[in-house]
Image (tube, grey):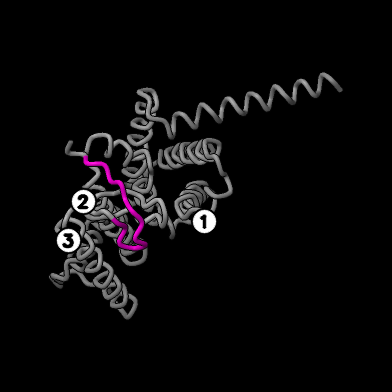
Amino acid sequence: MKAKGTRASQDLSATSRLRDMLRRLYHGRSPAAFRFQLVAVIIDLAIIAFFIATPVIQQSASFLWLDYAVAALVAADLIARLLASNDMLRLMKQPTFWVDAFILLTLLMPAALASLGFLRILRLWSLSRSGSIWRHFEMRGLRPWREASHAVINLLTFLFVITGFVYTFFFRNGAGLENYIDALYFTVATVTTTGFGDIVLPGIAGKLTAIVTMIIGISLFVRLAQAIFRPAKVFFPCPQCGLRRHEPDAVHCKACGHVLNIPDEGN
C-alpha cells in the first residue's frame, strides 16, 4: 500500500511539474517562452497554409499522411493548452477550443467530413485570439494595431471560408488549382460587390450564397475601416467594470465613472 501511495504521489508530482512547465511556456514572458511561442505560431501558420492548399493537394498520394500529421500537431496543442490552463473547464467552454476540437475531428475523419473541410481555416481566427501573439505586440509598442489586425484576420478568415464553401459545393467536380482560383475569384468579386458577372453560381442556392457573402463582406470591410481610421484609444482594463478601450487622456471610465490611472507610455 505504501509503495502504491508513493508511486501515485510521484505521478502527481510529475504531472504538476509538466503543467508548470507548459504554463511557463504558453503564458510566460521569458526568452525561452518567447522562442516557444514564436515556434508555435510558425507551426500554426504552416498548418493554416496546409488548410488553404487542401483543395489543390487532396488528390495526391501523400495527402492522408500530411492530414494525420497535422491532426497529431493539433491534438498535441489542445492537450498542452489544457494542461497549461489554470481552469480546464473554463478553457473547454471557450469558442476557440470548440473550433480547434472540430478542426481536429475533420482531420481525423477526412473522408466522412470532407464536405466540412473548408471550415478548417477557422484555425486562423482561433490563432488570432491567442493571447501570446498580442502579448508580444504589446511588448513592441504595437498595441494600437491590435484591433485593426483583428479586423484584417476576420476578413481573411471569412474570404477563405466562403472560398472553401463555394469550391466544395459548386466547383468540386473539377478538382484542382484552376477551380479553386475560380472560387476565390468569385468570392473576392462578390465581397467587394464589383460583380464582374463572368463567374456566377447557379440556382437559388448560388444566389443566396452571393447575397450572404455580400452582406457579411460589406460589414467586415466597414469594421476594418473603423478599426483603421477611428481615433486611437488606449487599452486599459477598468478595475470596476472591465471596459478596456478609453480615450488617451481619460480620467474616469465612460461606462461606470470609476477613476482611472492610465499610464502615460510617452513618458
Quarter occupied by the C terminus: top left
* Residue tagged 2: 248
At horizontal 82% and vertical 19% (from top left) the residue drawn is: 3
Q: Nearer the viewer, residue 252 or 33?
A: 252
Circle nearer the viewer, 1 or 3? 3
Residue 225: give its label: 3
Say whether marks 1 and 3 touch (CB < 8 Å).
no
Mark 2, Cα crowd under 10 Å, few <14 / some 14-19 / many 20+, is some
Q: CA distance from mark 2 to mark 1?
A: 52 Å
- The relative height of residue 81 versus residue 95 in the rendered view (above or below) is above
Q: Nearer the viewer, residue 174 or 241?
A: 241
**In the rendered structure, which disc, 2 or 1, sits on the residue that comes first in sequence?**
1
What's drawn in magenta, residue-wise?
Answer: 252-264
- As for residue 187 lying within the magenta part, the answer is no
* Residue tagged 1: 112
Say whether marks 3 and 2 touch (CB < 8 Å).
no
At horizontal 24% and vertical 49% (from top left) the residue drawn is: 234
- What's under tag 2, amino acid-wise? Pro
Quarter occupied by the N terminus: top right
Q: Position of residue 132 (x, y in %)?
A: 37, 38
**Magenta region, mostly helix, strand or loop?**
loop
